[in-house]
């Protein structure tokens, strides 16, 4: 542990460290990155932070800090940075983030459950202290393990919005991919023409276009990976989750996977695991001595079935909380309970969404933009908003431009009206 001095004095106080960890673990998902950044900044000052997570199909990329950096961060940059990470360590490297080459600190995680996450910090100092690097690496390990548990039981209120966001993103990346692929393929065709001169220039341009095509395909593959999960891998995660729950029970628990590698939307995979765990625990509580949980893909649906031999079939009814999980996804129950034979309960989950629910306009804004919008809705000027939020007036202007663009309005007045109509929670604060 480093000697006291600079920001390290907090390290010497265990209660302070524990309070900071508690502060981060209690954070709602949108606040996870800002809280981690604020805590880490006391030990490793940094200008900006960018995070990519494989467990959030709605917002796999999150940024915080200097808008001149965060406003230009791309998924391709973060994907490249992730390849440099070593789980449990802080890797100092010099790579591109926000369109410029910078000194970066890369933190990655590999939790038992979930796909893990990567965070890149832009340090304010050229040579971060070893003690600070070790501390933020350990801190990120703790936070990321906790965060990996959260997607296993997403709140019902966000499921529909998550599906809409994932569907919209998939549609956008497909359209973008087709457009760029056509343009780049045409470029390659022209550059390879024998009628053109300057072979060296043609070769260099050909290599550049070919690299761009590879990167574009890589981004599309990454988007698919973030918004979907192979059914067999999703079930393997369930097995890992159930193991500590049933290991010490005198009950025979049989788990039968789908034997199918087709991709499941992540919201479906998360919900299927939640339902499976809930039904298995319910069967154990009803005195069952034998339980079988299975998944099966049947056409365009995933069938999650739990069968048990519990005698108390009157209680063999899915819990209200589980019904709230499957309803936003268009799911339904099939229940077959026979006295002295036990119960078979199946959740039928559609794998597709017939009509994409429209995203609420405010869902397009990040937490800081919502705070700025709240100030606009209260009639505050940029200088007043900057003072309230401890920002520079230049930063507030940057956020206002982003807000107008995301809400598809042309003036502050229109944005204020929209905020009031949609009942932005902090407007009346």
Image: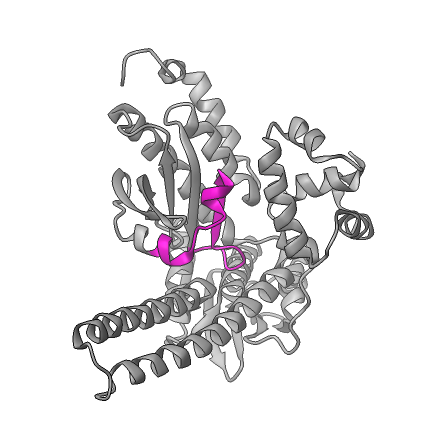
Look at the image and say whether residue 13 sits in the magenta stretch. Answer: no
Point out residue 202 in the picture as x, y percentages from the top left corner.
23, 76
Residue 367 placement: quadrant: top right
Point out residue 137 in the picture as x, y percentages from the top left corner.
32, 34
Seen in the picture, residue 289 relative to 135 is either above or below; the reply is below
Q: Residue at x 65, y 58 (%)?
A: 319
Q: Nearer the viewer, residue 172 or 184?
A: 184
Q: Residue at x 51, y 57 (%)?
A: 277
Point out residue 119 in the picture as x, y percentages from the top left corner.
38, 44
Q: Residue at x 27, y 24 (%)?
A: 129
Q: Nearer the viewer, residue 417 or 331?
A: 417
**Number of on-image labels:** 0
Asked if residue 184 lies left or right of residue 32, the reply is: left
Look at the image and say whether residue 64 sits in the magenta stretch. Answer: yes
Seen in the picture, residue 277 relative to 220 is either above or below; the reply is above
Q: Is residue 404 visible?
A: yes
**Which residue is outermost to the front?**
197
**Which residue is outermost to the top?**
4
Q: Is residue 367 visible?
A: no
Asked if residue 322 lies left or right of residue 73, the reply is: right
Q: What residue span does the magenta drawing correspond to? A: 54-79
Point out residue 429 in the picture as x, y percentages from the top left corner.
77, 33
Q: Nearer the viewer, residue 235 or 212?
A: 212
Q: Residue at x 59, y 30 (%)?
A: 391
Residue 145 placement: quadrant: top left
Seen in the picture, residue 242 relative to 397 is either above or below; the reply is below
């Amino acid at each position: 542990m480093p000697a006291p001095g600079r920001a390290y004095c907090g390290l010497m106080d265990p209660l302070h460290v524990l309070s900071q960890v508690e502060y981060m673990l209690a954070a709602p998902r949108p606040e996870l990155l800002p809280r981690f950044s604020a805590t880490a900044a006391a030990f490793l000052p940094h200008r900006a932070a960018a995070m990519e997570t494989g467990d959030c199909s709605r917002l796999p990329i999150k940024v915080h800090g200097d808008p001149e950096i965060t406003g230009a961060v791309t998924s391709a940059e973060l994907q490249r940075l992730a390849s440099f990470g070593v789980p449990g360590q802080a890797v100092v490297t010099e790579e591109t983030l926000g369109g410029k080459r910078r000194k970066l600190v890369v933190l990655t995680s590999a939790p038992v459950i979930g796909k893990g996450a990567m965070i890149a910090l832009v340090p304010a100092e050229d040579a971060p202290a070893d003690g600070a690097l070790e501390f933020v690496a350990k801190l990120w390990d703790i936070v990321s393990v906790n965060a990996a548990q959260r997607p296993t039981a997403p709140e019902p209120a966000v499921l529909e919005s998550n599906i809409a966001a994932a569907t919209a993103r998939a549609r956008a990346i497909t359209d973008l991919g087709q457009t760029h692929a056509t343009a780049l393929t045409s470029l390659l065709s022209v550059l390879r023409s024998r009628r053109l001169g300057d072979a060296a220039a043609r070769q260099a341009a050909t290599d550049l276009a070919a690299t761009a095509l590879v990167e574009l395909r890589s981004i599309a593959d990454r988007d698919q990976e973030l918004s979907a999960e192979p059914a067999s891998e999703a079930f393997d995660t369930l097995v890992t989750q159930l193991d500590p729950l049933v290991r010490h029970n005198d009950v025979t628990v049989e788990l039968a996977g789908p034997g199918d590698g087709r991709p499941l939307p992540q919201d479906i995979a998360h919900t299927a695991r939640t339902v499976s765990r809930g039904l298995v625990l319910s069967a154990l509580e009803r005195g069952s001595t034998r339980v079988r949980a299975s998944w099966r893909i049947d056409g365009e649906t995933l069938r999650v079935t739990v069968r048990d031999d519990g005698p108390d079939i009157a209680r063999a009814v899915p819990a209200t909380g589980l019904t709230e999980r499957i309803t936003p996804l268009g799911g339904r129950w099939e229940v077959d309970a026979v006295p002295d034979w036990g119960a078979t309960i199946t959740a039928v989950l559609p794998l597709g969404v017939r009509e994409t629910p429209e995203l609420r306009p405010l869902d397009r804004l990040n937490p800081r933009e919502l705070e700025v919008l709240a100030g606009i809705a209260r009639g505050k000027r940029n200088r007043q908003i900057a003072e309230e939020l401890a920002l520079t007036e230049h930063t507030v202007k940057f956020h206002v431009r982003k807000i107008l663009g995301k809400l598809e309005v042309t003036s502050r007045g229109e944005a204020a009206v929209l905020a009031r109509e949609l009942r932005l929670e902090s407007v009346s604060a």
